[in-house]
Image (cartoon, helix red, strand yellow):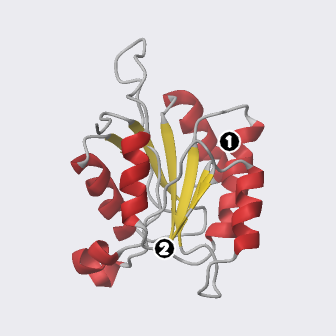
């Protein structure tokens, strides 16, 4: 049974100016029935933490295309955890510039507070992960839900075609590693 209506906060990392991956991810998540708040590219850690605290999302999805996901992701999740935010946070896309997944980097991201780390292009695992999430919490007040950032690897000139091939990252509360 697919869970629906998860409030997701979607974000790029502080140094990643790519937009098409975030558009692709937002559309993908919305087609699955989730509510998404897309913060866009180049989101500073303190802005991410502030919006997350204000909106109280069910999940934060962080996307990286430029290969700095590991470095920027550490800062983002540390900023969230330093504020005492316990929301599940996942990251995916291009996490390093070497072109290969590094198990040590994944381990450090998990140790820093990410709940899951997904390799570039793993849309199937993201879909499965989202299906395993509980329904959005009932919240007091209108418009309290928010959506999480997730990483997909696509660049602007590649457009929609690259979106289909885009790397997507997501994770499970059980600190899954794909």
**Residue lying farthest to the top in this orientation:** 140
Residue beneath disc 1? 80
Residue beneath disc 2? 120
| Position in image of residue 143 (x %, y %) | 35, 24
Whether residue 38 can be seen here: no
Q: Which mark is residue 70?
A: none
Q: Residue at x 42, y 11 (%)?
A: 140
| Position in image of residue 153 (x %, y %) | 43, 74
| Position in image of residue 45 (x %, y %) | 65, 51
Task: Give the mark toward the camera: 2 or 1.
Answer: 2
Viewer-closest of 133 and 137 = 133
Whether residue 157 can be seen here: yes
Q: Residue at x 46, y 45 (%)?
A: 148
Viewer-closest of 79 and 119 = 119
The residues tagged by marks 2 and 1 sit, at their Cα atoms, a distance apart of: 23 Å
Q: How many marks?
A: 2
Helix, strand or loop at mark 2: loop
Quarter that holds the N terminus: top left
| Position in image of residue 128 (x %, y %) | 39, 52
Mark 2 or mark 1: name the one nearer the start of the chain: 1
Quarter that holds the C terminus: bottom right
- Tag 1: Cα neighbours inside 10 Å, few (<14), some, or many (≥20)? many
* Figure check: 29 above or below 139: below
**Residue lying farthest to the front in this orientation:** 1
Q: Residue at x 54, y 75 (%)?
A: 94
Q: Is residue 58 left or right of residue 46?
A: left
* Figure check: 158 above or below 140: below
């Amino acid at each position: 049974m697919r869970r629906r209506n998860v409030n997701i906060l979607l974000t790029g990392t502080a140094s990643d100016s790519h937009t098409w991956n975030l558009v692709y991810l937002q559309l993908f998540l919305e087609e699955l029935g989730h509510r998404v708040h897309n913060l866009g590219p180049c989101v500073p850690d303190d802005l991410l933490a502030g919006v997350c605290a204000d909106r109280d999302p069910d999940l934060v999805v962080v996307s990286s295309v430029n290969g700095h996901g590991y470095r920027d992701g550490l800062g983002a999740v540390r900023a969230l955890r330093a504020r005492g935010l316990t929301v599940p946070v996942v990251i995916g896309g291009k996490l390093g510039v070497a072109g290969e997944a590094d198990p040590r980097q994944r381990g450090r991201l998990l140790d820093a507070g990410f709940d899951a780390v997904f390799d570039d292009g793993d849309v199937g695992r993201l879909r499965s992960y989202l299906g395993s999430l509980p329904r959005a919490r009932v919240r007091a007040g209108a418009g309290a839900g928010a959506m999480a950032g997730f990483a997909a690897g696509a660049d602007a000139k590649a457009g929609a075609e690259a979106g289909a091939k885009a790397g997507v990252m997501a994770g499970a509360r059980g600190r899954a590693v794909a």
